[in-house]
Image (spheres, helix red, strand yellow):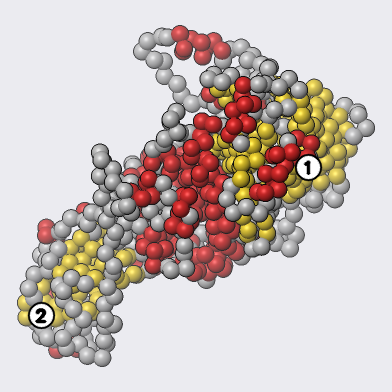
């Protein structure tokens, strides 16, 4: 796709405001021009019945699965594609997409070992033992790196289904050595292992109306495109292991002790997390490894994936949350190494997350939501793996606390994006990471009014990225595998763009309604970027093509320059100041050492309907909470917290009479290329302030320069662009105008001359305006 399509490239008129047109796919009966699914929208389905067994001594997993595939498409299929994600770890069957790799200046054993290992079969990846149809007849298949094509014995027509069986096994990878999302972590201190079983079974690729088979190879970067279905999974593990999993357990009765079952019953109505498996029980299990086996059975309906965790190290706690009257069991699983943080915060953060995301999207539809401390961060339906370990003495830093809370909120939030609103992560990372990071930011802001901003929302947080040279940037609309700066591109920039839409361009009411409509339309379906863009416009009545073009398809930054301010009084006064008399930007210090204001925080604080869990719940109020509010001192480090002053609204300007009014003409240039709304803060001589907000469409007639006239009731002392840093302006040194000089006299009656063009400011005739331009004013 072209990233900078213009209607008239030789013109400075309206190019950035042209409609996206053919950049977006043509609407059809499957996906409409409004952004909603069409009358003939369809999607496939795959149901799984899986049995697997974990061998802790050998670190292997053996499994068998029966898959029922439903062809809901109008097409006849002759083969199916399955994903073999565990082949990522194989030296034989991985996708083998490599980056350039310089030879170091000095050879070392580690380099030689790595290069030598790459030449041999390391034994990792799926071993397909057998593949057959329901009658037991073998099926032909071809493995292409991380993908497997299954030849159908007969064409699968529209409306038909096909059942087949697989038997397989693989070596489980050590995540500390091989990386990746699934695997195991070994704890040498107590000799135990914690398993995160993800991408652990062969699973169907998506076959869709817009792409056909999504069988792009898995390289470890772009995540997953998956189809919905129903799961029944039986996991056989050591008898003293505790399992957390996607779905609901069907046999707690067989696997929990009498005391644990009683605690589970107590947790159903508790207002505080109840330890189902206590810390004492987890420690006891660590020292007495069982040789027996137990089987846990889980069921999950209408999910796109299935993941689970298993370890004897787990403490397990639970409590209910209620979303529109529906009970959701919120649970956490964590080893003793994270007890001091997870016991206090994790499950309550899970509950807060599903309630807040439900407010901004759709009601959480599943019966459970779980957070697992596994020293990483990854998401699956109803379960996610996070980090958050304390020091050995149980203490923790403020950064660790907020980092843990941030990752729990982010990963639990992924239940909505993409587990329910099921975008194609392999192609568009930003559609799950960016949208989720945006709602994560809203959820953090509603957890604690002093939650430290970490870059997934406020416009100022993306400025350093936007400052980079253009040859080091990619548009958001880039394939996952091709992004050099993955964090800013897939997470921060799209999240920031949505927050700019909400706070600065559309307003909260219009945006929130439209965003909820997108979630409602595409829940349990497969949306594409055009479906999001079209829905937000369709539901709000706002033409946002200019914003999608600039922020999502382009790489130009925002850099507005306040070039001049001209002042004249209605009684005949005129004064002009040159550009050399600018003032510096204001410096503000939010919590955690940040020096940036936050318009979202300001509005949340002003909204009395918002209550914060940490303010209501004393159990959440730790040292850092009390310190941030001046209730507890810290003897080595002092943090200053400064809140922006309240903006005083100016009296409404009267248009009936000009006498006694103050007139200003502001000239602004667009140096960065990206068009954005113009936000002007006026500071009056009496110390009060006023903000004018001008929509981005002011740039339509001239995308490089605009001139705007204002009438004020009070005399202005200084002018500043973008006082709350809402537009991601990369150079704020040209956003300020200092004290304006005393006005010179000028006759008012000339402004009433019918021959004065409308472009001329009141009291200035065209000849004088031309002379001033020659002088550089």
| Residue named by callout 2 | 573
Q: Position of residue 245 (x, y in %)?
A: 68, 39
Q: Position of residue 355 (x, y in %)?
A: 57, 57
The label nearer to you, 2 versus 1, is 1
For the question of whether residue 166 can be seen, the reply is: yes
Q: Quadrant of residue 753?
A: bottom left
Q: Split into 4 quadrants, where in the image is the C terminus?
A: bottom left
**Would you place residue 26 above or below residue 257 in this image?**
below
Residue placed most toward the observer, 301 or 159: 301
For the question of whether residue 227 can be seen, the reply is: no
Q: Judging from the image, what secondary structure is the residue with disc 2 in?
A: strand
Residue at x-position 67% and y-position 33%: 242
**Would you place residue 686 above or below residue 556 in this image?**
below
Q: Quadrant of residue 464?
A: top left
- Image side of residue 83 versus residue 492, left or right: right
Residue at x-position 17% and y-position 67%: 718
Q: Position of residue 458 (x, y in %)?
A: 39, 54
Residue placed most toward the observer, 314 or 579: 314
């Amino acid at each position: 796709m072209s990233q900078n399509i213009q209607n008239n490239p030789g013109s400075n008129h309206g190019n950035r405001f042209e409609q996206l047109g053919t950049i977006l796919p043509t609407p059809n009966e499957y996906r409409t021009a409004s952004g909603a699914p069409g009358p003939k929208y369809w999607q496939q389905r795959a149901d799984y019945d899986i049995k697997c067994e974990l061998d802790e001594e050998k670190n292997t997993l053996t499994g068998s699965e029966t898959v029922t595939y439903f062809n809901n498409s109008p097409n006849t299929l002759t083969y199916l594609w399955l994903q073999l994600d565990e082949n990522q770890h194989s030296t034989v069957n991985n996708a083998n997409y490599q980056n350039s790799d310089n030879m170091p200046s000095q050879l070392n054993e580690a380099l030689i070992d790595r290069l030598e290992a790459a030449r041999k079969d390391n034994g990792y990846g799926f071993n397909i033992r057998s593949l057959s149809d329901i009658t037991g007849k073998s099926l032909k298949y071809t493995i292409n790196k991380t993908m497997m094509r299954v030849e159908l014995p007969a064409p699968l027509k529209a409306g038909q289904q096909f059942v087949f069986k697989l038997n397989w096994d693989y070596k489980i990878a050590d995540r500390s050595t091989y990386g990746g999302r699934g695997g195991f972590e070994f704890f040498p201190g107590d000799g135990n292992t914690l398993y995160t079983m993800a991408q652990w079974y062969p699973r169907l690729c998506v076959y869709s109306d817009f792409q056909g088979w999504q069988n792009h190879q898995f390289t470890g970067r772009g995540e997953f495109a998956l189809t919905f279905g129903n799961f029944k999974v039986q996991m056989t593990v050591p008898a003293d292991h505790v399992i957390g999993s996607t779905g609901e357990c069907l046999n707690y009765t067989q696997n929990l002790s009498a005391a644990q079952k009683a605690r589970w019953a107590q947790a159903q109505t508790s207002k505080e997390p109840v330890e189902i498996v206590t810390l004492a029980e987890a420690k006891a299990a660590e020292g007495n490894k069982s040789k027996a086996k137990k089987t846990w059975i889980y069921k999950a309906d209408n999910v796109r994936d299935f993941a689970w965790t298993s370890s004897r190290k787990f403490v397990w706690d639970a409590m209910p949350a209620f979303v529109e009257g529906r009970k959701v069991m919120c649970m956490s699983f964590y080893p003793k190494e994270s007890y001091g943080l997870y016991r206090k915060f994790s499950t309550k953060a899970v509950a807060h997350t599903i309630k807040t995301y439900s407010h901004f999207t759709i009601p959480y539809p599943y019966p459970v939501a779980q957070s697992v401390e596994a020293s990483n961060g990854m998401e699956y339906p109803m379960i996610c793996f996070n980090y958050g370990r304390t020091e050995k003495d149980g203490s923790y830093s403020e950064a660790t606390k907020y980092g843990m809370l941030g990752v729990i909120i982010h990963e639990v939030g992924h239940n909505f994006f993409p587990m329910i609103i099921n975008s194609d992560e392999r192609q568009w990372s930003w559609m799950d990471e960016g949208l989720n990071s945006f709602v994560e930011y809203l959820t953090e802001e509603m957890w604690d009014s002093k939650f430290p901003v970490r870059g997934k929302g406020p416009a100022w947080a993306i400025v350093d990225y936007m400052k980079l040279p253009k040859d080091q940037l990619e548009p958001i609309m880039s394939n996952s595998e091709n992004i050099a700066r993955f964090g800013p591109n897939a997470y921060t920039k799209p999240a920031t763009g949505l927050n700019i839409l909400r706070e600065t361009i559309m307003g909260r009411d219009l945006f929130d309604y439209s965003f909820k409509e997108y979630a409602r339309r595409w829940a349990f379906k497969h949306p594409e970027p055009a479906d999001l863009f079209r829905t937000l416009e369709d539901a709000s009545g706002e033409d946002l093509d200019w914003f999608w073009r600039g922020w999502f398809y382009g790489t130009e930054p925002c850099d507005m320059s306040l070039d001049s301010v001209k002042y004249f009084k209605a009684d005949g006064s005129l004064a002009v100041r040159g550009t050399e008399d600018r003032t510096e930007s204001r410096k503000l210090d939010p919590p955690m050492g940040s020096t940036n204001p936050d318009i979202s925080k300001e509005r949340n604080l002003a909204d009395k309907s918002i209550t914060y869990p940490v303010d209501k719940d004393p159990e959440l109020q730790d040292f850092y909470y009390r310190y941030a509010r001046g209730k507890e001192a810290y003897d080595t480090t002092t943090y200053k917290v400064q809140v922006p002053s309240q903006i005083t609204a100016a009296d409404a300007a009267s248009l009936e009479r000009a006498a006694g009014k103050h007139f200003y003409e502001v000239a602004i240039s667009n140096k960065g290329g990206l068009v954005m709304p113009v936000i002007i803060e006026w500071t009056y001589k009496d110390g009060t302030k006023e903000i004018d907000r001008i929509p981005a469409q002011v740039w339509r007639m001239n995308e490089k320069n605009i001139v705007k006239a204002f009438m004020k009731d009070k005399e202005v002392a200084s002018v500043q662009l973008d006082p709350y840093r809402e537009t991601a302006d990369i150079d704020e040194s040209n956003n300020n105008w200092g004290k304006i000089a005393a006005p010179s006299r000028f006759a008012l009656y000339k402004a009433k001359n019918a021959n004065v063009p409308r472009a001329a400011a009141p009291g200035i005739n065209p000849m004088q305006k031309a002379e001033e331009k020659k002088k550089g004013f």
